[in-house]
Image (cartoon, rainbow, N blue to C red):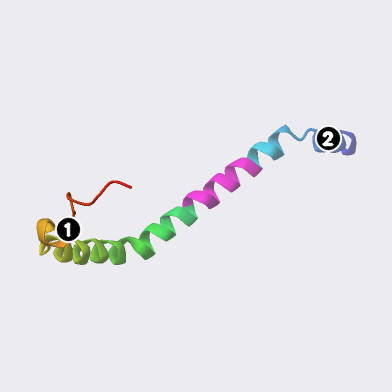
Amino acid sequence: MLKRICVFSKFEDGAVTVDWVVLTAAIVGIAAGVFVVFHQPVRDLDAKSGAALSGIDVADEISVRFDAPDS
């Protein structure tokens, strides 16, 4: 029995797979947490930016001098 355990412990393929699964699950969990925390503030910022930009007349804000001499 001890010999079988020693032989089993020498195979690392399963351990590497478990490591990748754990790392992937951690990344997915962190991404979900970031989404939950920042979802509403980003939506609020988007709404405020849209409201601010909708009130701007682009023709009034941009002044281009077409009669400027070439350098």
Residue drawn at (62%, 41%) of the image: 20
Q: Quadrant of residue 12?
A: top right
Is 60 drawn above or below residue 10 in the view shown?
below
**Which residue sits furthest right?**
3
Which residue range is magenta in the image? 19-28
Residue drawn at (12%, 60%) of the image: 54
Which residue bears the numbered disc 1? 63
Q: Amino acid at mark 1?
A: Ser
> Does the segment drawn in magenta span residue 27?
yes
Would residue 47 be found to the left or right of residue 59 on screen?
right
Provide residue 10's location: percent of width, then percent of height.
83, 35
Provide residue 37's location: percent of width, then percent of height.
38, 65
Q: Nearer the viewer, residue 31 or 65?
A: 65
Which residue bears the numbered disc 2? 10
Tell me the tag on residue 24: none
Please identify the quadrant where the N terminus is shown.
Answer: top right
